[in-house]
Amino acid sequence: MAVASASGSMFPPTNSPHKPWEDPSFFRWRKRDAHVPLRSQDTLEGALKYWRDRRNVSYLDAESAVWNDDAVRGALESAAFWSEGLPYARSLSGYWKFCLAQSPESVPEKFYDAQFNDSNWEALPVPSNWQMHGYDRPIYTNVTYPFPMNPPFVSSDNPTGCYRKVFHIPKEWKGRRILLHFEAVDSAFIAWVNGVPIGYSQDSRLPAEFEITDCCHHSDPDKENVLAVQVMRWSDGSYLEDQDHWWLSGIHRDVLLLSKPQIFITDYFFKATLDENFRVADIEVEVEIDSHKQDREHVPTFSIEATLFENSGPSDGLNSDLSVANVVNLKAKRKSKGGPCLGFHGYVLGGKMENPKLWSSEEPNLYTLVILLKDANGKLIECESCQVGIRSVVLAHKQMLVNGCPVVMRGVNRHEHHPRVGKTNIEACMIKDLVLMRQNNINAVRNCHYPQHPRWYELCDIFGLYVVDEANIETHGFDESIHFKHPTLEPIWANCMLDRFVSMVERDKNHACIIVWSLGNESSYGPNHSAMSGWIRGRDPTRLIHYEGGGSRTSSTDIICPMYMRVWDILKIANDPSENRPLILCEYSHAMGNSNGNIDAYWKAIDSTMGLQGGFIWDWVDQGLIKEEADVSKSWAYGGDFGDTPNDLNFCINGIVWPDRTIHPAVNEVKYLYQPIKISLVDNILKIENVQFSETTEALDFSWILHGDGCVLGSGSLSVPNIAPQSSHLINMESSPWFTLWSTCAAKETFLSVHVKLRYQTRWSKDGHVLASEQLCLPQTKGFVPQVIALSKGPLISERVGDSVIVSKNNDWQIKLNSRSGTIDSWKMNNVELLSKGILPCFWRAPTDNDNGGFYTKCYAKRWREAFLDNISFCSSQFSVKELPDHTVEVSTIYYGLPGQLAKPGDDAAVSEASESALFRVHMRCQIYDSGDVVLKYEVNPKSNLPPLPRVGVVFNADKSLDRVTWYGRGLFECYPDRKAAAHVGVYESSVEDLHVPYIVPGECGGRADVRWVALRNADGYGLFASVHGESPPMQVSASYYGTVELDRATHNHKLVKRDDIEVHLDHRHMGVGGDDSWTPCVHEQYLLPPVSYKFSVRLRPVLPSSLCHDIYRSQLPH
């Protein structure tokens, strides 16, 4: 597609009136046509060994992933590693001379000349983004362009990087052609070799390759060659690259020298067509040859051979005579007789394979394709090779079928992102991503929103990830303009848009992992997209097309691929009889901070509805960049932290893993909902279902464990026959190994947990990895009879001291109540302080990112603040203390929650008058027993015009020494009412420190759902026990050194300031965290807390080192 050309005089000097980087019709000059990655191997054996080594990757390699300053060296080492074993390839990775100019017009004069003196220039690693090494600044925007919008022109403030690198041509390359290959440069660049301009290119995510044979000193290997590169940060191409990520510049992927013979293999396309039974594959390989004009007469005397080798066996395809590993030899196909050949003018080889091993995510079987070019005498001239997979991707009624199976996309979106080196890639870090994905049952990835590093696709082939490969086209910022049309509607942008798509396809076409091509992202819809879809349907009918723009249902997409569509709406489309295409959500469950609520509702629909085939979570990784603070500490930064304007703040912090790939708590929910083994209990029958399409359960171990009220009743292995794909096994509960234990159990609650583990290690995990798990609440078979606490007959001592009422039992414990505030101000046991601040009602939480999101409608947090829920002052009225005949003390008060700007009333009469302005009226009754038990009963009546409430519960401050937390509820990880399906009910332990979840932007976090009881203890075992009481349902509980005020105040996790005590929340109800998106209030209705009356009870009790929380929970206070 050489659609743009120019003379060399256009470039030096770069201050000529014509600026090629502001001309959409000029996007490549002297750039070779796109093709598959070339390796130029010299022997068949060398090609097979190269791929054997490249496939030798596993979860062990992920352990060497680095995320700090060591990553700079790691990036250089990876770039060098990727060309190892290739005799005719040399990586130019390393430190280059670098100078940053303010604009293309201000670059040093003739810096590209070989004799230019660069001694005072600094050294910059290549590959890298220069902003990650102290030059210029990173900029994060989501939609808005970071320069004044005036297409195709860009800002005159256009930082321009000037690079120089000395290289030598090996003597072994004498007489061969030399290619200079840039894997990717952001955003536009001009290159010179020895002062001669060799080319120009745009597209920040795809290769640019130039032939430099005639301008190199290759006759003398000792003679220096000088490569100079000028990189513009902004170009007209930037208008097509408005993806939601950091704008970073420079030579961010490797630069290679390739040596080729005079006549060489320049491209090839592997195609496999399967018969209807998937037992015979018709193989075809198209091969293109490159030669100079003067050599073309010799081309017909050359021959092409192609062979497929199987990648299996102890030698992994390297047999002594290669005959055993040889699967099929491909022969040249005869050209059709008659008229002139239309279309492809290269060589076509073909053959058939019986019983091929198919590639899929579950079984990523690969073959090595080797193509040999020989001269007239049969001498090997060169060899090209790659990994290929045989599989079928077709459309059926409301289904995408891979190898005839309606596979489900259990996916994520993935940006290329590293917190230290930005867009630069590291082998171990890519493997880390894939290992984490596979370990958490993710089987698909959408490359958002551009083609990624070539090695990424090789690894996806190997590890078995379905890939949506997306063109580097996004023009989201045009949505904000009323003056400019989207480029897809403008003819002047047609060629460059098509070139980006074509170049991606031609580079990546041989990868089995790619099952869908994407035309780009958020670029509206128009004729230029129609042109792209028309081209690919002719070029590659073996894959489907995806494009969300224009409403996700245009004629250019084979898949309905909406983003953030609600569950009820995707169900409508799936049930629409007039729509034959499958629906796959290209983005859903926006993972911004404490998010991913409601995701289980999506999977309930997907798992049960024909026409729904999964989706891709937005997104994989928090795009935080390492920033050194004034005190030399380092933190993760987001938009604006580098002084970048415009910016979209923390909208780049929306992954399910942190920048260093530590997983968010929500990953547990994803893993559970994506798990390939489903376990359910219906009508006393346990059903174990294998929802995979090709793998049986032969390599899996099943086990069970039975809990009663959090205590282990029994456990063991579970004998399960080998379950075929898409099949299930039923177990009658009465014949199960746990039946006797269950049927004789007298617990309040009995839970059966089933775990499914890998029997053997795999490429992505060691043996024993938990692949799937399920917890089932079993019905009670025997009635639970609680133990009634025997109370002593002696009265409690209560006395008034000023505004305080002190209730005590001998010297065992003492409670001090404040008659003015109506709260417990102090609670001591054996002189150990348990509480440092009184127990009060609480209805506020520190807003999460989703709470703060309200682009189209007013967000929850704003509605809460307008209603003063963040600033409620409680005053007490009608405080009373009674000593009851049963030797208990009853305290009663009414709290009025007043907007914080109102003055606090001084007496009951003033309180009564102020009550008209109260947002909440809370009647609290507290009963104190001589056992130390305190039962708090609350009746909450909010004002009816309040917005949905963040929480309904109580808050108190425990002494900071009570930093050991044990609870019986869901865990071990953070969970909330709308994100708790994966969290099993059990007894868990944690420190207060570890309960905190360090979301980069603080907010409500660290909660645990469905808690029956919780205990906070000090190092000696003294502490405070809290549980639900009476008919109250389990609580939402949190304990943190950071109170709601501090979590709301701090803009970054590292800026949080610890309290001198522990803020504890016991919530009767807690609003869901939401996550359908982060810019619309979208917590599902069942997880909202309307302003209606609530009643609940909480039981508190001091505990000794000898106290057993389980026994306290099972005990009952006398009525």
Image (tube, rainbow, N blue to C red):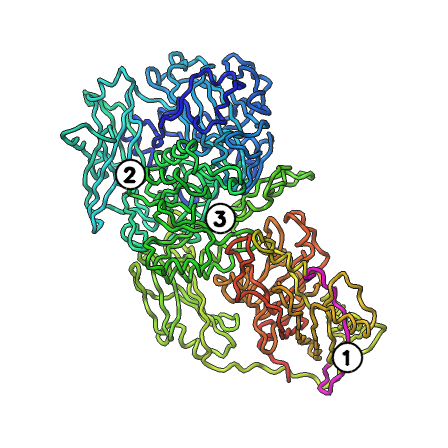
Estimate the x, y position of residue 455 in percent, counting from the top left: 40, 37
Q: What residue is disc 2 on? A: 538
Report the disc number at residue 33.
none
- Compared to residue 473, the image places residue 857 above or below, namely below
Picture coordinates of residue 757 (x, y %)? Answer: 40, 58
User: Residue 662 placed where, x, y %?
Assistant: 53, 49
Write down the quadrant of residue 375 in the picture.
top left
Residue stretch rendered in magenta on the structure: 867-888
> Which quarter of the picture shows residue 949?
bottom right
Along the horizontal axis of the image, is 55 left or right of 92?
left
Q: In this view, does 494 lie above or below 1113?
A: above
Label 3: state its secondary structure: loop
| Amino acid, disc 3 | Asp
Do tag 1 and tag 2 residues touch (Cβ < 8 Å)? Answer: no
- Is disc 1 surrounded by few (<14), some (14 to 19) or many (20+) residues within 10 Å? some
Q: How far separated are the C-alphas under marks 1 and 3?
A: 55 Å
Q: Mark 3 points at which residue?
A: 619
In the rendered image of this protein, does residue 7 appear above or below residue 631?
above
Q: Name the residue under label 1.
A: 881
Label 1 vs label 2, nearer the camera: 2
Alpha carbons under labels 2 and 3: distance apart? 32 Å
Residue 6 percent location from the top left of the image = 42, 19
